[in-house]
């Protein structure tokens, strides 16, 4: 069983660990070969570990290997006598409502749902859209797709109908699985109704809608298939499809600096291996541990570290439906005490929110079960890091500050277990994972060598868990990631390598902002604003926000023929909420007469970012602006937010 494949665990002897790590780094393909044989159950062993052609953005791992992902995540554990072990602990929104689901039960539910999908005519390679709350049914649906070789595409249940419709149609999904309502922090979101509005935009696209009755409060539509009933009527035994290591497992949409969100395709063999390896290694996962990643399955963190990584390792994984402050700010810590959680993985935005509420909420609960505390999604501020380490972890836990991306599928950098000896650096991801070779490049593409330097973060070699393409648009995949600096993967992040060779991520270097750990392109927000009839032009930038990490500030020029009212800013926020989702709605809308532009008409966002961040002394050179006085007007208007 994979969880016993401890070849990668640290030994007490640091010198051994360093030698082992260096050895793996010398020959990563041999390392992945050994890992793939140990960790995965293959129906047919691959004939080549890796076969890439980076000039064409082609990444292939474990060529001609055949397997089934659900079999690896479920059946293998049942067959090895662990069927009664808990696979999922569902911590429902309603405090104190918990359900334990064993591997045997998981198997049965996944099989039933796989059979329902087959009845609906879903075939291997088809895409199935999931728009679901955080309950075990989301996991059943993902694994049911994997069972039959279909490709799931989850849409985070905070996205609006427009965003959902765009993803269903881009992925050409014919079947949608959704719920009547989702419940988070006691608030209900009418998913079925939102889905209905989405489907009205794309008539004829979806032929079957399966509805989970999470609350049972919304009457079903005439053509809905009730999920619980359909599953109860279906057989608990299902065949597993044989898929190629390079066949698609899921699509997940993510934002970039330009254009509509991209549907990144992740494949079956390499992704699953990388999920399992990194979950065990970076969280020091040991059989019997209770592991909790508190992310939503709608994001990559949920895919890899709520579902695939833990399950391929036979772990017990917590499905957390609620929010950190419901019913109060002790929810996480009360849950840690009650479930005896060993590893807790969350995001800086949640920690900032909780830190503000004071230490009492934490201290009144027993956290002695915790060993590793993980953070992901954005840079963790050193003072938040210290609070996590000193207060939450009582100085007893390792902090895993994990840097990675939707595109990389799994953790790429994280302080290695040696960091405790070398001295932790709060806010630094520090060490690359095995097989990850980071490079810092200048804008001219030249590598910046040595230590104590800063540059654009690129990666030299593809790792098994990386996305293989942008669904339906391989050219875009190559252009976005592989052709800025030929031969290297461009991350979109900047980084520093300090005097000891440790990495510190400095943030995005493109027009992507990170709002409460949710990734958004400023261009997406700008296109939504244009949907309002009064908007002529807009520029959106991020600014530091003490809870969300980054807040969204929109500078909007109204059309000459549009007369603003006291409600205009509110309407503009509403348009974005409607088009993308509530999390993308601007925190500030500033109506402006003009935007700072160069003589060639390019908006100088750098200046807007400085104003929004209130760094008025650092506006830099304004001489290239066509109309420098525009800046004074914007600064004047900015005062309303101070
Ligand atoms: C940022 C989330 C600093 C980074 C898994 C990256 C981080 C983007 C960290 C990807 C970290 C993620 N420290 N920044 N530990 N983790 N980021 O695709 O800018 O939602 O490019 O994947 O989040 O966000 P995504």
Image: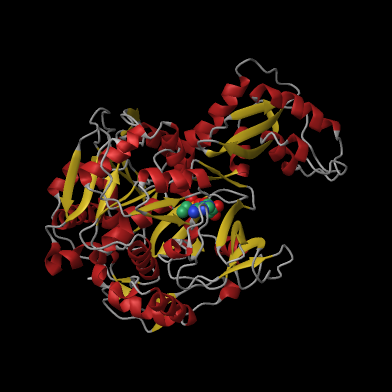
Is residue 601 visible to us here? yes
Q: Position of residue 411 (x, y in %)?
A: 44, 61
Please state which of residues 567 and 1 is positioned toward the viewer in this rendering: 1
* Residue at 47% over, 56% down: 406
Residue at x 60%, y 74% (from the top left corner): 55
Residue at 72%, 42% (x, y): give it: 605
Q: Position of residue 535 (x, y in %)?
A: 67, 29
Quadrant that contains the N terminus: bottom left
Q: Is residue 530 visible?
A: no
Visual colour scheme = secondary structure
Tell me which corner region of the image, top left, top right, bottom left or bottom right, holds residue 360. top left
| Foreground of the two, 123 or 42 | 42
Count of numbered labels shown in the rendering: 0
Describe residue 310's horizontal placement relative to residue 513 as left or right.
left
Q: Residue furthest top?
A: 566
Quadrant (top left/top right/bottom left/bottom right) for the C terminus:
top right
Question: Measured along the vertical axis of the image, is residue 32 above or below residue 640?
Answer: below
Image quadrant in which you'd find residue 28: bottom left
Task: Tell me residue 202's x, y (percent).
Answer: 45, 41
**Which sits in the foreground, 587 or 107?**
587
Residue 579, x across and y down, in percent:
52, 35
- In which quarter of the view is residue 398 placed? bottom left
Give me the residue at 26% from left, 32% from top: 220
């Amino acid at each position: 069983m994979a969880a016993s494949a401890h070849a990668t665990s640290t030994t007490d002897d640091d010198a051994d660990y360093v030698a082992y790590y260096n050895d793996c780094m010398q020959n990563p393909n041999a390392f992945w070969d050994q890992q793939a044989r140990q960790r995965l159950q293959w129906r047919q062993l691959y004939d080549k570990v890796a076969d890439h052609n980076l000039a064409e953005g082609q990444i292939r791992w474990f060529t001609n290997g055949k397997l089934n992902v659900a079999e690896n995540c479920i059946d293998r554990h049942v067959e090895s006598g662990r069927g009664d072990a808990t696979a999922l602990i569902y911590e429902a929104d309603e405090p104190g409502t918990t359900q334990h689901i064993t591997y045997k039960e998981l198997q049965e539910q996944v099989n039933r749902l796989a059979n329902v999908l087959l009845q609906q005519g879903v075939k291997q390679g088809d895409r199935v859209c999931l728009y679901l709350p955080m309950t075990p049914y989301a996991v059943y649906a993902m694994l049911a797709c994997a069972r039959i070789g279909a490709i799931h595409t989850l849409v985070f249940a905070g996205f609006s109908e427009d965003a959902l419709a765009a993803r269903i149609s881009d992925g050409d999904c014919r079947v949608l699985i959704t719920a009547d309502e989702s419940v988070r922090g006691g608030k209900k979101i009418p998913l079925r109704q939102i889905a209905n509005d989405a489907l009205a935009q794309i008539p004829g696209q979806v032929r079957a809608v399966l509805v989970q009755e999470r609350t049972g409060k919304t009457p079903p539509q005439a053509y809905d298939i009730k999920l619980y009933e359909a599953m109860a009527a279906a057989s608990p035994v299902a065949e597993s499809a044989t898929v190629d290591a390079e066949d698609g497992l899921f699509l997940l949409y993510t934002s970039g600096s330009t254009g509509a969100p991209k549907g990144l395709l992740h494949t079956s063999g390499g992704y699953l291996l990388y999920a399992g390896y990194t979950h065990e290694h970076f969280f020091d996962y040991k059989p019997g541990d209770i592991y909790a990643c508190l992310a939503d399955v709608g994001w990559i963190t949920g895919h890899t570290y709520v579902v695939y990584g833990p399950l391929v390792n036979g772990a017990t994984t917590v499905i957390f439906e609620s929010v950190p402050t419901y019913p109060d700010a002790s929810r996480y810590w009360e849950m840690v005490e009650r479930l005896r959680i060993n590893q807790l993985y969350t995001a800086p935005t949640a920690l900032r929110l909780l830190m503000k509420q004071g230490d009492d909420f934490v201290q009144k609960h027993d956290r002695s079960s915790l060993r590793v505390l993980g953070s992901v999604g954005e840079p963790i501020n050193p003072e938040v890091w210290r609070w996590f380490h000193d207060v939450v972890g009582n100085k007893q836990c390792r902090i895993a500050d994990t840097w990675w991306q939707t595109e990389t599928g799994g953790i790429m950098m994280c302080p290695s277990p040696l960091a405790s000896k070398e001295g932790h650096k709060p806010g630094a991801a520090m060490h690359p994972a095995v097989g990850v070779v980071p490079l810092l490049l200048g804008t001219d593409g030249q590598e910046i060598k040595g230590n104590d330097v800063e540059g654009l973060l690129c990666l030299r070699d593809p790792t098994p868990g990386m996305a293989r393409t942008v669904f339906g648009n391989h050219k875009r995949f190559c252009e976005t990631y592989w052709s800025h600096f030929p031969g290297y993967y461009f991350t979109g992040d900047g980084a520093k390598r300090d005097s000891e060779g440790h990495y510190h991520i400095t943030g995005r270097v493109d027009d992507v902002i990170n709002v409460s750990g949710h990734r958004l392109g400023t261009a997406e927000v700008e296109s939504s604003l244009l949907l309002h009839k009064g908007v002529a032009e807009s520029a959106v930038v991020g600014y530091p926000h003490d809870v969300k990490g980054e807040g969204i500030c929109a500078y909007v020029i109204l059309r000459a023929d549009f007369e603003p009212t006291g409600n205009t800013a509110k309407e503009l926020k509403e348009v974005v909420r409607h088009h993308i989702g509530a999390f993308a709605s601007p925190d500030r809308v500033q109506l402006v007469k003009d935007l700072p532009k160069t003589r060639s008409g390019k908006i100088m966002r750098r200046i807007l970012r400085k104003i929004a961040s209130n760094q008025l002394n650092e506006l830099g050179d304004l001489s290239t602006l066509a109309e420098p006085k525009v800046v004074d007007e914007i600064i004047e208007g900015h005062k309303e937010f101070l």
